[in-house]
């Protein structure tokens, strides 16, 4: 089992930056791809970005490409999401997810085995 805890969400203005963190605990010696998804009430969970266990591969949703950056520090069991030039449409609950695989985890929520509880990001225009 792996437990994921996100932090760093908050209320910011359009154009601001925010950094989310996700700390993993438990069975962290396995190799996990990590991802960030986001979700609005009543909507499906949306893929944002994922990163391979080594950090050498990443895949971004077109809506965040060039503005968001994912990174990970395996020594700290932590994955980060640096969000710049935030827009009102980035408002959502952001979830961290883990999938036991060497490569990228994929864009479908059902491909991931573990999830955090989410952190709210609100961008006011």
Image (tube, helix red, strand yellow):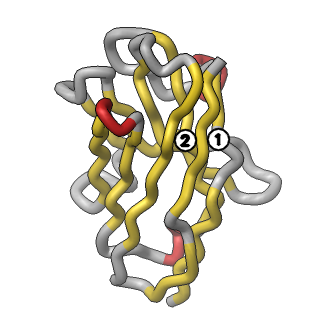
Q: Quick check: marks 1 and 2 in contact, CB under 8 Å?
A: yes
Residue designated by label 1: 116
> Residue drawn 40% across and 34% down?
77
Label 2 secondary element: strand
Q: Quadrant of the N terminus?
A: top right
Residue 99 place in picture, x, y as percent: 51, 19
Residue count near mark 1 (Cα–Cα under 10 Å), binned few <14, some 14–19, many ≥20: many
Of residue 92 and residue 30, the one placed in the foreground of this image is 30
Residue 93 place in picture, x, y as percent: 64, 58
> Residue drawn 33% across and 41% down?
60
> Residue drawn 43% across and 14% down?
29
Work out whether mark 1 precedes mark 2 in sequence or the reverse, and give the earlier one: 2
* Numbered tag placed on residue 96 in the rendering: 2
> Residue drawn 23% across and 29% down?
55
Residue count near mark 2 (Cα–Cα under 10 Å), binned few <14, some 14–19, many ≥20: many
Residue 28 place in picture, x, y as percent: 48, 21
Above or below residue 48? Residue 110 is above
Instruction: Using the numbered discs, state the Cα–Cα distance from disc 1 to disc 2 in whole angstroms.
Output: 5 Å
Residue farthest right in this picture: 42
Residue 109 place in picture, x, y as percent: 62, 28
Residue 32 picture quarter:
top left
């Amino acid at each position: 089992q792996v437990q994921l805890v996100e932090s760093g969400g908050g209320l910011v203005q359009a154009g601001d930056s925010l950094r989310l963190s996700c700390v993993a605990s438990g069975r962290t010696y396995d190799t996990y791809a990590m991802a960030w998804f986001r979700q609005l009430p009543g909507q499906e969970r949306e893929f944002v970005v994922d990163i391979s266990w080594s950090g050498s591969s990443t895949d971004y949703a077109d809506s965040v490409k060039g503005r968001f950056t994912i990174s990970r520090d395996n020594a700290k069991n932590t994955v980060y999401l640096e969000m710049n030039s935030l827009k009102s449409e980035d408002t959502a609950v952001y979830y961290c997810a883990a999938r036991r695989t060497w490569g990228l985890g994929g864009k479908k929520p059902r491909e991931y085995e573990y999830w955090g509880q989410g952190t709210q990001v609100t961008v006011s225009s």
